[in-house]
Amino acid sequence: MATGIAGVWLSIKEKILAWPFFIICYGCYIYISYQFGLPALMGMNVVFIGLSLYGWAKWSNPKGSVPAVQVSRTPRLHWPLVAGFICVGTVGVGWLLTHYDGATQPYFDAFATCCGFTAQWMLGRKYIETWLFWIISDIIYLVIFALGGFWPTVLLFAVFTVLAIKGWSDWKQQSVLTDSSH
């Protein structure tokens, strides 16, 4: 979807306008998920809207002179929480998908979903590593959608993967420049 691509591009450029584009994109996916009877995907996009509102608030700066959040590395203290969330979330969501949704790839789907939640939260904080989690999530979903024959969505996730690689490269370069100026 064009709104998702626009949101990713704008987030790479650190433009707050990314967040409304994400919200529109996720709203569309809620509708599509409902139409195709995919409650887990629908629920995931509801969470993404909440995380987008969080990111929008984090990036907002009422004074407007300096960005409210700067691109930075994820603090070391966050990594055990991130790992714990992804592990516990994957098991929990995978179990739910297996027992209540009849998903064909429940644990891959759950892992990609938890990586996506982590990435969206990290994006709100402008942690460079957000892009690594997007790359992982996008590639897994690309494979899942390819196995299901959803070729337009495969193409979309291929574009998302390329954009996430660009985001990683740009933000990493920006971080090096910022670190060397201090």
Image: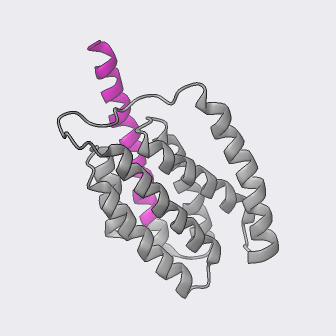
Residue 43 spot, x, y in % from top left: 59, 70
State the image coordinates of residue 97 (x, y, percent, origin top left): 74, 69
- Confirm whether residue 102 shows in the render: no
Q: Residue at x 32, y 62 (%)?
A: 20
Q: Quadrant of the N terminus?
A: bottom left
Relative placement, left or right, of 34 versus 159 is right
Q: Is residue 14 above or below residue 5?
A: above
Horizontal arrangement in the rendering, residue 16 relative to residue 82 (left or right): left
In which image quadrant can residue 165 be found? top left
Please give left or right for residue 51 compared with residue 88 in the image: left
| Residue occupying the point 29% across, 46% down | 60
Q: Residue at x 46, y 63 (%)?
A: 49
Q: Looking at this view, is 116 or 65 the one in front?
A: 65
Relative height, residue 178 to residue 172 (above, below): above
Q: In the image, is residue 113 part of the stretch drawn in magenta?
A: no
Say which quarter of the image contains residue 104: bottom right
Looking at the image, the residue that sits furthest to the left is 65
- Tell me the quadrant of the picture where the C terminus can be found: top left
Q: How is the image coloured?
A: one colour
Q: Looking at the picture, how far across and down is residue 91, in whole percent? A: 78, 54
- Magenta: main secondary structure equals helix
The residue drawn where x is 73% and y is 46% is 87
Residue found at the far bottom of this picture: 35
Question: Does residue 39 lie above or below 136 as drawn?
Answer: below
| Relative height, residue 76 to residue 110 (above, below) | above
Q: Where are the magenta residues, as a range? A: 156-182
Per the image, is 163 magenta? yes
The outermost residue toward the front is 62
Q: Nearer the viewer, residue 152 or 167?
A: 167
Q: x and y percent of residue 22 in the render?
A: 38, 62
- Number of numbered callouts drawn: 0
